[in-house]
Image (cartoon, rainbow, N blue to C red):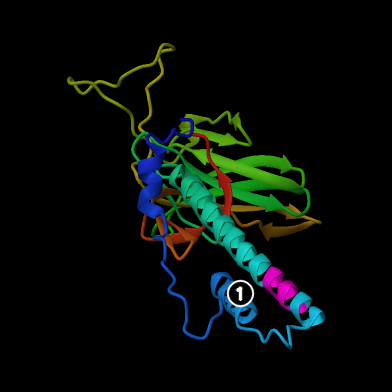
Amino acid sequence: MSINEVSNNGAILDQYRTPEKTTEPKDNELGRDAFLELMVAQLNNQNPLEPTDNQAFVAQLAQFSSVEGIDKLNTTAETMMSNFSSTSALQASSLVGQSVIVAGNDTGLLLGNGVVSGYTELQQSAADIKLTIEDENGQVLEQFSLGNHISGPMSVRWDGLNLMVDGKIQDIDMDSLNRQEYYVNEDGEQVLDDYGNPIPVPYPPGEYVFRVSGMVGGQSEELGMQMSSTVDSVTMNNGSVTLNLAGGQTASLSEIKQILDE
C-alpha cells in the first residue's frame, strides 16, 4: 500500500493551524509610528533660536531606522514561524493512516490483512541471526533463522504468515511453523492452492513483538528492534506537532525512524 494522498489539504491544515494571536501594544513600548510622530512633534516645536543640533538629529534618524528595522525583522520572523508551523502540520497530516517506525516502540500492531514491521540499525556485522516472534503476553510463537547480515539498517515485515527481510521474501517451510491451521471449505475439507497444498491460516490481528539476536564478535547479542505503529491523528499545540499512534502512544516527528510504504 503506497502512502495515501491527503485530499483537501487546506481543510486538514485548518484543523491544526495555530490561531493567529492579536498582540496589543504595551503601554511602555514605543513603536515605529509613535517614534516618528514624536520626532516630528519635536521638530515642529523646537526653538527657532536654538534649533536641534545636527548630530542629535542624525542620531534620532539612526534610532528611527533601527526601530523600523527591528519591526520588519520581527514581522519576518513571525511569518517564517507561521509558515514553518503550517508546513509541519501539512507534513504530519499526510501521515494519518500510515505505518511508521518510532524510536522506543517495541510492540507492533497487526491489523486484519495488514503488515507489522520492525527496524534496527546493526552497528556491526552479525552472524546466525534469529528472529523470534512473541505475542503481547511474551509467549513465543515462531522463530526464524535469517542467516548473516552486514552492519547497517535491517527491516523485517510480517503479515502473520509470510516474512520479508530487507525487501526480500523469505523461503519458509510452512510445515515447520508452530501454527498448523488451514483454511477449510463449507464441507470441512482443506482448501488447496494451485499446487495441491493446503493453505495455512495466518496469525490473527493483535500486538506482536520481534526479538532479534545474533553472533557479534563471537558473542551472542540481542540486537534490538523497533516496531511499527499506525498514525491515527495529529495534534498541533503552540506550533509543536504530535502524532497520536494506535494503542494510545504519542510521538514527535523527530522520533520517526522510518515511514513504511505498505
Please give the residue where the numbered disc 1 appears in the rendered image. 40
- Percent position (x, y) of residue 234? 40, 53
| Residue at x-position 41% and y-position 47% | 13
| Residue at x-position 78% and y-position 75% | 58
Q: Secondary structure at mark 1?
A: helix
- Percent position (x, y) of residue 129? 67, 47
**Residue 110 appears anywhere in the view:** no
- Look at the picture and state if 155 lies above or below 105: above
Is 184 placed left or right of 142 in the picture?
Answer: left
Which quadrant of the structure image shows residue 49?
bottom right
Which quadrant of the structure image shows residue 220?
bottom right
- Percent position (x, y) of residue 171? 58, 28
Q: Which residues are magenta?
A: 59-66
Is 32 placed left or right of 233 in the picture?
Answer: right
The one nearer the camera, 30 or 227, is 30
Tell which residue pokes out farthest to the top in this image: 194
Is 148 placed left or right of 8 in the picture?
Answer: right
| Residue at x-position 81% and y-position 80% | 55
